[in-house]
Amino acid sequence: MMKIKIKSGDLVRVNAGDHKGQEGRVLRVIRDKNKAVVEGLNMVSKHTKPSAKSPQGGIVKKEAPIHISNLALVDSKTKETTKVGFRMDGETKVRFSKKSNQVI
């Protein structure tokens, strides 16, 4: 199992696949499958039956998970993709951008 350096709320860019080059915020991370759901990307159509929750039913668009290896964190300062590192700031472990050396 690989170390996941992307967390929910991070701005990421897709670097492989059909959505290459697109950006979005991470909604949630699925740790056991090494995948993340990104807002507005990798949309799939799901056919739903009418129920009490959705009385009309029909086709619903929703985000599907993308593998973590196909995502790269976008640095907030330089607006470019960057690698993530970990270091100790006093007693706390923090993530930092390796391009700008800023704490994320």
Image (spheres, rainbow, N blue to C red):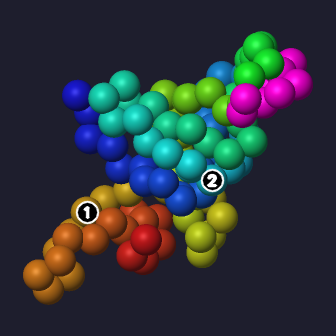
Q: Secondary structure at mark 2?
A: strand
Nearest the viewer among 57 and 7 is: 57
Q: Which numbered disc covers residue 74?
A: none
Nearer the observer, 68 or 98: 68
Q: Which mark is residue 25?
A: 2
Do residues under tags 2 and 1 come within 8 Å of each other at their CB atoms?
A: no
The answer to whether any part of residue 69 appears in the image is no
Residue shown at the point (62%, 27%) measured from the top left: 64
Q: Which residues are magenta?
A: 52-60
Few, some or many residues within 10 Å of mark 2 (<14, 14–19, 20+): some
Relative to 98, is 92 above or below? Answer: below
Residue 6 lies within the magenta run:
no
User: In the picture shown, does residue 73 fall above or below 78?
Assistant: above
Quarter of the image for residue 87 reads bottom left
The residue at which mark 1 appears reads as 86
Magenta stretch holds residue 56? yes
Instruction: Select label 2 or label 1 by which is in front.
Output: 2
Q: How many marks?
A: 2
> What residue lies at 38% left-to-right and 56% top-to-bottom?
84
Point 42% across, 77% down: residue: 102
Q: Position of residue 60 (x, y in %)?
A: 80, 26
The type of residue carrying mark 2 is Arg
Q: Magenta-highlighted stretch: main secondary structure? A: loop
**Residue 69: x %, y % from top left:** 45, 32
At numbered mark 1, what does the secondary structure look like: helix, strand or loop?
A: strand
**Residue 27 % position (x, y):** 56, 49
Q: Quadrant of the C terminus?
A: bottom left
Residue at the farthest bottom position: 90
